[in-house]
Image (spheres, helix red, strand yellow):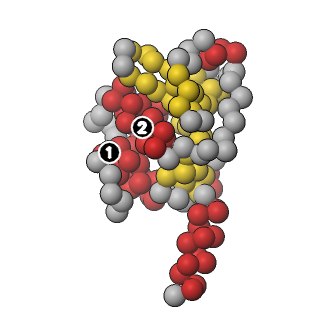
Amino acid sequence: MIATKNEIEILFGLWAREHLITGRQAQQMYTWNELRESVAPSTSLSEFKRKFSNMVLTNADPEYKAKIHNVVKNKIVRIIETCHLSEPRKGELVVEYGRATIQGYLINIGYSPEHGSSVIAFRRDMSALHILSHFKSQG
């Protein structure tokens, strides 16, 4: 496994290996609460959002350029690298817009007008798989 003290990152890695393999689930978007219920149901929503956000911040894509929806613009209180964060509670920063690669998965967080809330989408990071297969073939 990976070296992390963030139990949400460990739980996400285990969940992703089991649930993000099929094409149908790989295309699904999750609200924060849906993802929490799937990955860490015994964790409070605020704790899950904070720890998942920390995981995204640590692994943020430096090339990401957010297209902020008007509904969310006033919620953004801070930008760290390429991630745009809100502060639903004092001292609790949550990613509203961001992209990261974690354990071989590309994670996108952003506002969805269809859902009326932030959503999280995943897909396998094919560039990471290509690099890994290249190193394996080199022996």
Q: Residues within 10 Å of mark 1 (few under 14, many from 20)?
A: few
- Location of residue 73 in the rendering, given as x and y in whole percent from the top left corner: 64, 16
Residue farthest to the top, as pictured: 74
**Residue hosting label 1:** 6
- Residue 47 visible in this rendered orientation of the protein: yes
Marker disc for residue 54: 2
- CB contact under 8 Å: marks 2 and 1: yes
* Of 85 and 123, the residue lying toward us: 85
Q: Of marks 2 and 1, which one's residue comes earlier in the chain?
A: 1
Image quadrant occupied by the N terminus: bottom left
The secondary structure type at the circle numbered 2 is helix
Q: CA distance from mark 2 to mark 1?
A: 9 Å
- Residue 114 visible in this rendered orientation of the protein: no
- Location of residue 127 in the rendering, given as x and y in whole percent from the top left corner: 64, 63
Image height of 128 relative to 105, above or below:
below
Residue at horizontal 38 percent and vertical 15 percent from the top? 89
Q: Picture quarter containing residue 81?
A: top right
The amino acid beneath tag 2 is Asn
The amino acid beneath tag 1 is Asn
- Location of residue 20 in the rendering, given as x and y in whole percent from the top left corner: 53, 54
The secondary structure type at the circle numbered 1 is loop
